[in-house]
Amino acid sequence: MMNAVMSPLLNLKVAKDRKGIAPNKPLLVLAILDLFEAGLIGLDGLVHKDAQLNLRFRSYSPICAPRRGNAIDLNLPFRHLASDRIYTHDGDEERVVRLDPVLLARFLDPRFRQEARRRIVATYFPRGRASGLIRRPGHANAVLGRAGRGPPRPGRIQGPA
């Protein structure tokens, strides 16, 4: 079952050129995993194209910019990741998406998220950049102190661990 669920994550339709694989779609999936780690995606599976997502997505730019030679941009992968069946757009403005229900169920499991992150990084990124994408000191996960602990309980303010 894990391979069937993992398959869409490992077979994203990514652009390829002389610089290698465009990192935008895999980085967006990693940013969505970061939102789960921070407890910012609920059981409804809605992902908003907002400051939280953009912050996490752009935090990967220093790792990928040297490889591609340009900054990464959230707009195109946010729009086109739907073609990979990771999510569907919820509404006409393309600012909110709803994760695939099977994928959502698996993303709720911290062990699956960690394995997904490991396999996405191994599939799409050169070895020299991989460790920075799996676990980066000072990244949103580390700052929020939420890595692997699931969503915060309602009514509780979560500070650094």
Image: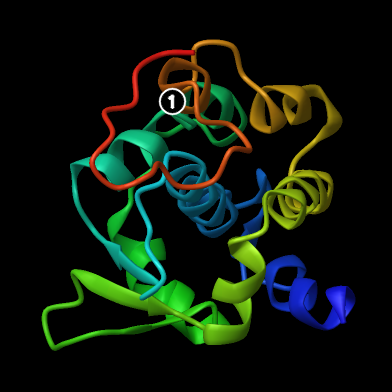
Helix, strand or loop under label 1: helix
Residue appearing at x 74%, y 41% in the figure? 125
Q: Is residue 108 left or right of residue 97?
A: right
Q: How is the image coloured?
A: rainbow
Q: Quadrant of the N terminus?
A: bottom right
State whether residue 143 is above or below residue 94: above
For image coordinates 77% across by 50% down, the residue present is: 111
In this image, 78 relative to 62: left or right? Answer: left
Q: Which residue is mark 1?
A: 140
The image shows residue 157 at horizontal and vertical percentages of 26, 28
Q: Amino acid at mark 1?
A: Ala
Residue 104 location in percent, x, y? Answer: 55, 73
The x and y percentages for residue 93 are: 11, 79
Badge 1 crowding class, 10 Å Cα cut-off, few under 14, some 14 to 19, many 20 or more, is many
Total of numbered circles in the picture?
A: 1
123 w.r.t. 69: above or below? below
The residue under the point 66% across, 43% down is 19
Q: Indicate the position of residue 33 as horizontal and vertical percent values.
A: 54, 50
Quick check: 66 left or right of 18?
left
Which quadrant of the structure image shows residue 10?
A: bottom right
Q: Quadrant of residue 86?
A: bottom right
Q: Is residue 49 above or below residue 36?
A: below
